[in-house]
Structure formats: structure tokens, C-alpha cells
Amino acid sequence: MEIAANSVVSFDYTLTNEAGDVLDTSQGQSPMSYLHGHAQIISGLEEAMQGRKTGDAFAVTVAPEQGYGLRQDDLIQSVPRSAFAGVDEIEAGMRFQAQGADGPMIVRIVDLSEDSVTVDGNHELAGATLHFDVAITDVRAATAQELEHGHVHDHGADH
């Protein structure tokens, strides 16, 4: 079966950056599964999956625009430290949910001072060109419940 809209796709992958550093991998874990055509993985990778089938292995380079987007300077802000009232310890690298103009978003602390905290709402991979090595391990039609719920169920189970 070829990968098309409403297919459940399982795949192994290794993600590297421009320098060849491994950023993420499914090695040693279960393959990743997603519902094709439902924007559950980045668009550049999903487009590269279209028409492939079980057993296919390939490499794909995904530009920032089809990955996690370009970095947006307006998503980096300095906020008063009082915005973190109730948080005992604040350190660079910590993530928090914040309310953005378009709803909830995850921000990462990038800098601290005595009075303020600089947060970055960009995805950590925004602006990065991504390199994926992919091996398709399974392709099947989604069940009615998976389509109704909008996500993959383990082994196609209806729940």
C-alpha cells in the first residue's frame, strides 16, 4: 500500500542538523506513527512520505519553511520576573506554557536577570534545515475511529 491521505504510517528516523549532529532518533524505540494528511508531522517530511510504501528507505532535507518555520524575533520577549510568581527556581532552558496572541504556546527561558526573564516562543528548531534518514516500517488504512478521532490508535484498535 502506498502512503496517501488517511494512511497510518509507521517509520524509523534519525534527524540531524547541518553539522551532522543527531537531534532526535527513533533508534532503540518503537517506530513513530502518524495519520498521513492530517498535519501531524512537519510538512516537508510529510510531503516526502507521499507515495512511498513499507520497506522504503530514503533521506530528505527539509528547509525551515517546511519544518519548524523561520525564527521570529517578535517571539523573544523580556517579561518581569514576577510573571513567574510561585515558581521557586527559574533556570535557562526551562519551558513554560504562556498565553500568546493566538492562544497557549510553549516558551523557553533563554536569559535571566534579577528583575526580568527573557523567553523565546520559537520552536528550538525554527530556522534550522533538517536532515532526516527515514525507513518506512508499515503503511495501512486508518480505521473509521482513527479518522473520527484524528489520531492513530495502537495497532488500529478502536478506542
Image (tube, rainbow, N blue to C red):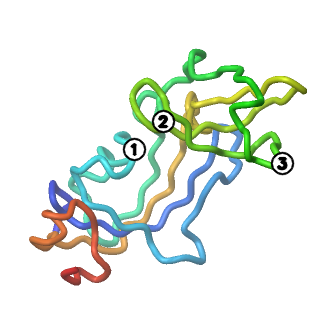
Bin the neighbour count of mark 1 within 10 Å (Cα to Cα): few under 14, some 14-19, many 20 and up. Answer: some
Q: Amino acid at mark 2?
A: Tyr
Mark identifier at residue 76: none
Q: Which residue is mark 2?
A: 68
- How far apart in space, not on screen, are marks 2 and 1 (Cα)? 7 Å
Q: Quadrant of residue 118?
A: top right
Bin the neighbour count of mark 2 within 10 Å (Cα to Cα): few under 14, some 14-19, many 20 and up. Answer: many
Secondary structure beneath dot 1 equals loop
Q: Is residue 86 above or below residue 70?
A: below
Secondary structure beneath dot 3 equals loop
Q: Nearer the viewer, residue 19 or 46?
A: 46
Q: Nearer the viewer, residue 69 or 89?
A: 89
Residue at horizontal 14%, vertical 70%? 141
Q: Which residue is mark 3?
A: 89
Closest to the camera, between mark 3 and mark 2, is 3
Residue at horizontal 9%, vertical 71%? 144
Q: Nearer the viewer, residue 27 or 98?
A: 98
- How far apart in space, not on screen, are marks 3 and 2 (Cα)? 29 Å
